[in-house]
Image: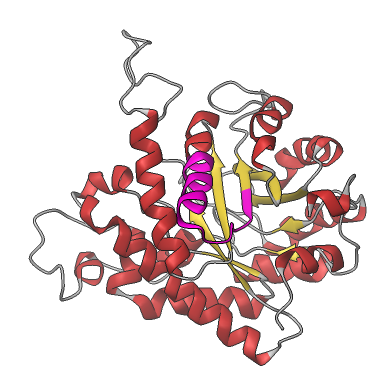
Amino acid sequence: MKKTIQECLKERILIIDGAMGTMIQQHKLEEADFRNERFKDYHKDVKGNNDLLSITQPAIIIGIHKEYLEAGADILETNTFSSTSIAQADYDMQSLAYELNLASAKCARIAADAYTAMNPDKPRFVAGAIGPLNKTLSLSPDVNNPGFRAVTFDEVADAYTEQITALVEGGVDVLLIETIFDTLNAKAAIYAAKKYFRSTGIPELPIMISGTITDASGRTLSGQTLEAFYVSIMHAKPLSVGLNCALGAQEMRPHIEELSAIASCATSAYPNAGLPNAFGEYDEQPHETAHIIEEWAANGWLNIVGGCCGTTPAHIKHIADEVAKFQPRLLPILEEAL
């Protein structure tokens, strides 16, 4: 029988994959590639809607997943960062939200199952990626009207419920609420997940939660310190809590150290490949990122680690090779948390 992710976390530091967008960019796709035959006459430009590629170019998405698995990834994130009706409204593709999530989950499932079959002692898992949305519940988009909100809690929860339904039906192993800059949005996702499992009677999947510290202040965009963020979401009893995006490994280091000291569940980290240069590109080389993260593993701060913006399979391979030498972080209350 395939080991559970909880069992694997007790054995070793697990590797989550790297950036999907970075890899898609390497394919240099044009508008026609995003549209393919099905959307050839669509009324809006869709280039840049990377999630759509799970429908129009599934072979590319499966291929990227396989590159990360080959590099050593244990956990694949589905290509669903913007696959909610709220985010897809930018392309007038709200009606595709369910299908996008289902297709993306199946792409990741195909790749993960293929690699698990080749090495059953190293099972590969699929994390249903639930992004932060392009609208926030805590902040007003109108500086002249701080009380205004572009969306309601119920609207956000409904959008996440649709996404979660399709991800679960597509066969994901865990739900990953990630790149959180607004904790209230994350709470809507947590609420949606808990309500979905309660109402359907489907066994509850583990939830991974990953926030974003946006700058040197050490706070989320909506103003919370890291400790406040953790306290705000710990009621969800997540499988893991961690940080991703916004910062490179060097800048993320003190926050991962702090999180490892306060979290009673597993900790995760997937930083960017350094900070972007003047052209918005990432210059940090795989061995540089891995060298920084090696120290985190040596200090016993990590349970799950990988890469975000700018990272490639080469980054993941270097990270995987470096952290394989170290034991996973010991949880303060191991059995209760896992």
Q: Is residue 203 visible in the rendered structure shown here?
A: yes
Q: Quadrant of residue 312?
A: bottom right
Quarter of the picture containing the C terminus is bottom right
- The residue under the point 75% across, 65% down is 14
* 333 is higher (above) or lower (below) than 305: above
Q: State whether residue 337 is above or below residue 61.
A: above
User: Against 335, is 6 above or below?
Assistant: below
- Residue 273 appears at what percent x and percent y? 62, 53
Q: Quadrant of residue 316?
A: bottom right
Magenta segment's dominant SS is helix
Where is the N terminus found, in terms of image quarters?
A: bottom right
Nearest the camera: 262 or 20? 262
| Count of residue discs | 0
The residue positioned 64% from the left and 48% from the top of the image is: 274
Q: Residue 229 lies in magenta, yes or no? A: no
Q: Residue furthest bottom?
A: 118
In this view, which residue lies farthest toward the top?
A: 144
Examine the structure image and report whether residue 198 is included in the region drawn in magenta: yes
Q: Quadrant of residue 123?
A: bottom right
Instruction: Specify whether 226 is left or right of 301.
Output: left
Query: Could you tell me residue 198's position as x and y percent?
Result: 51, 50
The spot of residue 64 in percent (x, y) is: 49, 74
**Image vertical order of residue 221 relative to residue 14, above or below:** above
Q: Position of residue 280 (x, y in %)?
A: 47, 46
**Residue at 49% across / 73% down in the picture?**
108
Looking at the rendering, the stretch of residues picked out in magenta corresponds to 189-208
Residue 135 makes an appearance in the image: no
Q: Is residue 260 left or right of residue 309?
A: right
